[in-house]
Image (cartoon, rainbow, N blue to C red):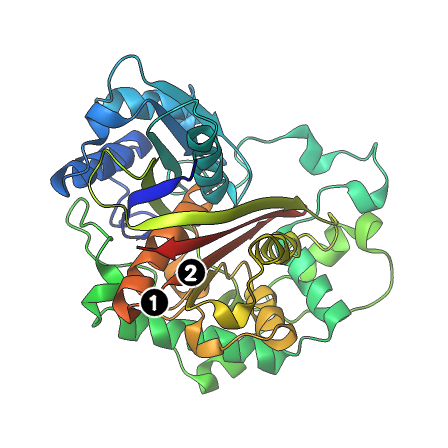
Amino acid sequence: MSAFIHDAVRTPRGKARKGGGLTGLMPEELVAALVDGLEARGREPRRLAEMLLLSCVGQVDAQGGHIGMVAKLKAGLRPEAAAHSLNNFCAGGLSAIGHAAAAVMAGQSDFVLAGGVEMLSRVPFMADRASYYTATDMPPELRYIPVALAADLLAERLGITRAALDAVALTSQTRAVAAEARPGLQASRLTVAGLGHDEAVRGTTAEALATLPPAFPGLAAEYRAIVGDGPFSHRHTLAHAPPLADGAALALIGPEQGAGRPRARILAFAERGGDARDSLTAGTAAMEAVLARTGLTLRDIDRVEFMEAFAVTIARFLRDYDVDPERVNVGGGHIAKGHPMGATGAILTSALLDALDEADGRLGLVVASGAQGVGVAMIVERL
């Protein structure tokens, strides 16, 4: 049995700070707004969904208490629907969609709502205060390393220059600004709480980018036991990092029949782990797995949504893989639009379907990476 994406919707990405466009809502209210949006689009998730799989990284405080269950109740899904909260760091929103597809293909569920939510304005980064973040009882290569520091180390090891980082950041911002005038790229982005655009997009110039200093050299001293004593070049500035954001996204996954015409069929899905120190390379490992499973190459793919988990990831992808850059992140990427962590993979899936529709394309690829070697990828066929 195949699994299909009947629809996928997303909120705008709001600034995760006081006065941000979504800060007046609770996380479960974002999810409920998306369920309302799917209903308005004729997909009937309240009648169909047998399960909600919801990714969220910071599952404490406003996002605690089994956020998947809380969101199920707030959204008015039927009482017998199951609910799961999952955490796969920044790739979790895509993991949720893949796990939903597996449940459908196994015949365990007919229709599943899957995606993610994160409100960093309410639950700050690392608010769970996990012991692992500061633990010293593991070998240095297995200890927690901040993603920003891992990004700098990876750029050094791979020879990704500051100029290359600036170039991809400029492209991300420029395309994100232009995308607001392309309705097709926003067809599945719903207006929520009066916010109808991705709030973090700011635009920039090459000259402005060149003036910014590296933002994370202090981390090397703090984590000296992990990175060692040797000097290395800190290259990432704040402009090379995705801004923290609030947001959510959901996809309705099911068989081909029963909820109207699906938007896409899921051809392949893979999750991969990676080296904890390199941290941000597992997404491309998952990408290679789905390409191998389908027998496709990147040149066969019409649109790619590649998570810009710091500029080094997208710079490496464009440099080291045979891919047409004009097909990648055509509406701008995370560096410009922001990063609501647990929602990210699902947001990119929704954006991918819009990009395929706008281009009348057939094949799409979404790739997500997260801290400590977390990677997920999926290939879809537009119908």
**Residue behind mark 2:** 364
Q: Are marks 1 and 2 in contact (CB under 8 Å)?
A: yes
Residue 182 visible at all: yes
Mark 1 → mark 2, Cα distance in angstroms: 8 Å
- Which residue, as the protein is rendered here, is positioned at the far front? 1
Residue drawn at the location 82% of the way across and 46% of the way down: 141
Q: Secondary structure at mark 2?
A: strand
* Rendering coords of residue 223 (x, y %): 76, 50
Vertical placement of residue 71 versus 353, above or below = above
Horizontal side, residue 282 vs residue 38: left or right: right
Q: Residue drawn at (59%, 79%), measured in percent from left and top?
A: 164
Amino acid of disc 2: Gly
> What amino acid does circle 1 point to?
Gly
Residue at point 32% right, 29% down?
Answer: 111
Residue where numbered disc 1 is placed: 361
Q: Position of residue 240 (x, y in %)?
A: 53, 68
- Residue 178, label in figure: none
The part of the image, by quadrant, that contains residue 31 is top left
Q: Measuring from the top left, give residue 101's x and y in whole percent.
A: 44, 36
* Helix, strand or loop for disc 1: loop
Find residue 310 and report its horizontal and vertical position in percent.
Answer: 56, 62
The quadrant in which residue 144 appears is: top right
- The reply, left or right, for residue 4 in relation to residue 141 is left
Observer able to see residue 15: no
Q: Residues within 10 Å of mark 1 (few under 14, many from 20)?
A: some
User: Between 204 and 155, which is closer to the camera in this rendering?
Assistant: 155
Counting the numbered discs, the total is 2
In what quadrant of the picture does the N terminus appear?
A: top left
Q: Residue furthest bottom?
A: 207
Question: Looking at the image, is 201 positioned above or below residue 127?
Answer: below
